[in-house]
Amino acid sequence: MSEPETSGTHPGQPRPVRLRDALLRARIEAADRTGVVVDLRDAEVARLEILNDALDPLFAQVPDQIDLFDRGVSQGDTPRLWIDVVAHIVMGRDKRMYRFVQDTRFGRIVLAESHDTAAIVEAVTDYVARRMVERERAMVVPPEPQAPVVAPPRRSRFWPFVFGFVLGAAALFGVAVVAALRSW
C-alpha cells in the first residue's frame, strides 16, 4: 500500500486521506476496467455476428417446416451464437477462437474449435445435417409388431364325457340305494 502523503506545512505528519479522493480514483480505475471489458465483449459480439452472417446460406437451405433451429446471438455476460436449444458457439479465451459446443445430459462437449470461420461453418453444417436426420428418424413411426394369433390348444372332448358319464352313473346308483333303504 502507499504511504499517506505528507503536507508541506507540517513535515513528518501524515496528511489525512480524503474518502472523496479515494472514491474518485476507484471510479476512474473501474471505468478503465469496464471500458476494456465492454470493448472485449463488443469484439466478441462482432465476431459472432460475422459468423452468423456466414451461416445465412446454410440456414436458407433448411426447409421452413423444420423448426429445430433457433439461431441468434445472445448478449449476456458471455455472448453466444445459438444454433438450437442445445448447441451454441462461444469465443475461446483468446477471443479469436470459435468454440462450437453442445450441452448434453452428461455435460458440455466441444464439437469444433477453430480460428477459421469456414471450419466452424463446416462443423455447424454437419451438425445441422445430423439433427435433421435424427428428426426424420423420430418422425417415422415403425409399425407395431403384431403378435401372431395363436389358436388356443384344442382339448380332447372324450375324457370330460367319460368323467361326466361315470359321475352320473354313480349319482343314479346312490339315489337308488337311498330309495331302497327307506323303503325297507
Image (cartoon, rainbow, N blue to C red):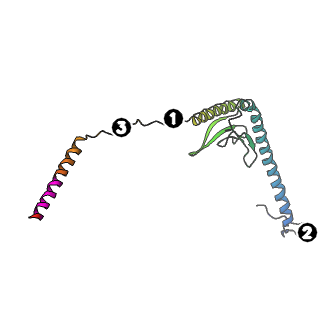
Between 125 and 37, the one nearer to me in the picture: 125
- Identify the secondary structure beneath mark 1: loop
Horizontal and vertical percent position of residue 113? 65, 36
Whichever of callouts 3 and 2 sits on the residue coming sooner in the sequence is 2
Q: What residue type is labelled 1?
A: Pro
Q: Which of marks 2 and 1 is in front?
A: 1
Labels 3 & 2 near each other (Cβ < 8 A): no
Between 21 and 150, the one nearer to me in the picture: 150
**Are there few (<14), some (14-19), or many (20+) residues within 10 Å of tag 1?**
few
Labels 2 & 1 near each other (Cβ < 8 A): no
**Are there few (<14), some (14-19), or many (20+) residues within 10 Å of tag 2?**
few
Q: Residue at x 65, y 32 (%)?
A: 123
Whichever of callouts 2 and 1 sits on the residue coming sooner in the sequence is 2
- Identify the secondary structure beneath mark 3: loop
Q: Name the residue under label 1.
A: 143
Specify start and end residues of the magenta stretch as a single range. 170-182
